[in-house]
Image (spheres, rainbow, N blue to C red):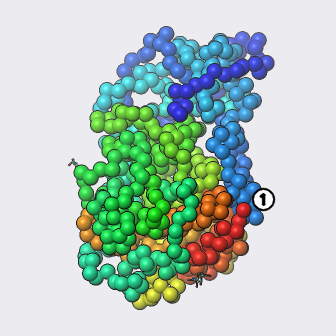
Amino acid sequence: MHFPLAFLALGLGYLTFCISAPSSTVRSHHVVHEKRAVEPIDWTISHRPERNKRIPLRIGLTQNNLENLEDMLMAVSHPDSPEYAKHWSLQQVVDTFAPTEETVAKVVGWLKVSGFSSEKIKMSGNKGWIQVDATIAEVEELLDAEYHVYKHMETGEEQLSCQTYSVPAHIREHIDLIKPTVHFNHRPSPKSVNKFKRAGDLGKPSSSTGPKKNPVSKPVSSGSIPPALADCDEMITLDCLKALYSVPDFKPKSKDNTYGIVEFTPQAFLAGDLDMFFEEFEPSLVGVRPDIVLIDGAVVQTTNQSFDFNGESDLDLEYAMSLVNPQKITLLQTGDLVEGAGFDNWLDAVDAPFCTFEGGDDASQDGIYPDPLPGGFKGHESCGIIAPPFVVSTSYGQDEASATAFYAIRQCNEYAKLGLLGSTILYSSGDDGVAGNGGLCLNSTGQADANGTRFNPDFPATCPFITAAGATQVNPGSTVFEPEGASEQVIFSGGGFSNIFSMPSYQKTAVETFLKDHPPPYNSSQFNNTGTSRGFPDLAANGANYVIAIDGEFELVFGTSCSSPVTGSFITMINDARLAAGKRPVGFINPAIYSEQFRDAFNDITMGGNQGCGTPGFTATEGWDPVTGVGTPNVSKLLPLFLSLP
Ligand SMILES: *[C@@H]1O[C@H](CO)[C@@H](O)[C@H](O)[C@H]1NC(C)=O
Ligand SMILES: *[C@@H]1O[C@H](CO)[C@@H](O)[C@H](O)[C@H]1NC(C)=O
Ligand SMILES: *[C@@H]1O[C@H](CO)[C@@H](O)[C@H](O)[C@H]1NC(C)=O
Ligand SMILES: *[C@@H]1O[C@H](CO)[C@@H](O)[C@H](O)[C@H]1NC(C)=O
Ligand SMILES: *[C@@H]1O[C@H](CO)[C@@H](O)[C@H](O)[C@H]1NC(C)=O
Ligand SMILES: *[C@@H]1O[C@H](CO)[C@@H](O)[C@H](O)[C@H]1NC(C)=O
């Protein structure tokens, strides 16, 4: 389903107003809708386009009901709700957020008054866009704009663009954006990209979001891996995790269960590493691979091999596949080798309407396909190529500050829609404590800076509609039978408060209790301490000293990168039990895990903190805290609780 290509004829009949207004009057009421703030680097004006050249003008309409999204999600996710687990169909989601009839009528009315006949006006399948074929002269008149053909200095590619455009004042609230206008449908060139970190560089070794090694540690020989639970404070194995979280034996009973792991190219697993790990810990999996879905020309590359290229994928698959064995794992490998991908790209692949929702993906963050760069993927963007898995774990993140609020909110709303459809979306919460990627904090203008002192939270972890997983450790000298602490070896659990998202209702009591009973010794210039912003993470799982097979050796790795796929494995086990009992999967779990009735199913973490930005960070304490969330799961307790819900 490629929506921009599949425009349907629009049945018209509600055009009732403004017919007699002369177009000159309409145009004199135009107001500027969008104006480009800075001219794009690497694109130069080439020439004026031919006046009678026809172009497909696409008008993105304002979406409806987004302000009710949280309530709608709560209705299917809160354990006390009579609608619990009554997930929506994709069509219901499309219809609910589609623009209102009034919006469609007003925009169509404007087009007709401006001289476009009904036959020329088409509507997209997701109801979000209206398309008209028009000449340049007509578009310039309609939008009070002046178009030029721009040329890309590197590739010679041409694009039509204007610097500003206007619409009638009474139409403005019904329009999100119009294309082609001020937007450049192309990522900035590699030269200009280095100036900022974009989501699209996630899989690159430079992104520093993957698991970390202890700089002084050496590879572990197979013979020195301790049997069973002897040294879980020094090396975490599957047995340690099963003991820590009281994981019952897992024998899948449902055929319909799904669990997806997202990886961004060029990050890739090595088959030999998986088998090396399985031979040691889960022999029945030797030779078994994930089901691979290639998104946007992705490849599971083996040309470049190193810790930075293979660490994340090897870790995620070795642990997730082993924990849920023989349940199959779906690998969502995302992005081509040239351009890479951002979070929006895997979301497009599981939900076609998102490809164009609110203007589509952001060329400065995401991969935009077809990719015009030499060697790039020339096919179409992957839109809706698979159904969303019931659980998706993604161990990548970016500084929230490196995304615009528009970008972050559009994407976050999509996670809520996936929750409505019945998926659990897990993200690692970051490895730098209260600091951001690379240990940087924010300066007074809100940018990551070596001299910054403001805490720098991680996105998508700060999105209130995903489940953010922080990291714990078996404290040195302790066993799995003693309480864990927050991870304070090599990495510190990402946690804190969003600078974009406000506090969702499900965590209000937990966060307010934390701020009241344990007020952090930091002021408003260090973090949003109003008690009205989204706190994270939501829960935690061990993230220190994982034994993984990587590039032919066993190594120890650290990170919330470990915590997310392990938590996802537990939810997958719970979903299997629910599916086998004829119930729906758990979907969005946050309203449940913060609820009173689930309190007992988590091991509260009350030791350690998440230092950063020259401070000790926040401190893990009784109840929810912005280091380890509600704590680590006790699967033996979580499972019957979730199974008892409708
Ligand atoms: C990956 O391998 C290719 C081909 O050998 C090489 O050109 C490229 O520089 C490598 N990339 C990195 C980051 O090492
Ligand atoms: C904040 O950091 C950015 C990036 O390093 C820098 O360009 C900007 O000047 C800094 N602002 C202040 C007020 O220091
Ligand atoms: C950080 O502060 C030091 C000392 O005030 C100054 O020399 C340096 O230029 C600053 N660095 C940045 C990136 O602003
Ligand atoms: C704190 O967060 C809330 C909720 O997002 C927001 O309304 C408020 O403006 C923020 N306060 C500051 C000082 O940034
Ligand atoms: C907040 O605390 C920091 C560090 O203690 C201090 O430098 C700063 O002046 C304080 N800001 C306000 C507004 O009190
Ligand atoms: C987890 O729950 C089980 C079953 O109630 C209990 O036996 C076990 O002690 C709990 N584990 C922890 C670490 O509290």
- Write down the quadrant of residue 152 in the picture: top left
Left or right, 369 with respect to 25, comes to: left
- Write down the quadrant of residue 325 in the picture: bottom left
**Is 187 situated above or below 517?**
above
Q: How many labels does the image show?
A: 1
Task: Identify the residue shown where x is 59% and y is 55%.
Answer: 423
Residue sitting farthest toward the bottom? 477
Task: Identify the residue shown where x is 72% and y is 59%.
Answer: 84
Q: Nearer the viewer, residue 31 or 593?
A: 593
Q: Element at badge 1?
A: loop
> Quadrant location of the C terminus?
bottom right
Q: Which of 587 and 360 is in front in this view?
A: 587
Task: Identify the residue shown where x is 52% and y is 27%.
Answer: 5
| Residue that carries the numbered disc 1 in the rendered image | 82
Structural crowding at the residue carrying mark 1, measured as other residues with C-alpha within 10 Å and reported as few (<14), some (14–19) or many (≥20):
few
Q: Nearer the viewer, residue 249 or 135?
A: 249
Q: Where is residue 362 in the image (x, y as percent from the top left)?
A: 48, 41
Q: Nearer the viewer, residue 407 or 39?
A: 407
**Is 378 situated above or below 570?**
above
**Is 490 situated above or below 468?**
below
Q: Is residue 541 visible in this depiction of the protein?
A: yes
Q: Position of residue 565 (x, y in %)?
A: 47, 64
Left or right, 58 with respect to 335, comes to: right
Amino acid identity at mark 1: Pro
Task: Identify the residue shown where x is 47% and y is 52%.
Answer: 402
Q: Where is residue 554 in the image (x, y as percent from the top left)?
A: 29, 72
Q: Where is residue 225 in the image (x, y as percent from the top left)?
A: 32, 80
Q: Is mark 1 within 8 Å of ligand 6?
A: no
Q: Is residue 522 visible in this depiction of the protein?
A: no
- Write down the quadrant of residue 452 in the picture: bottom left
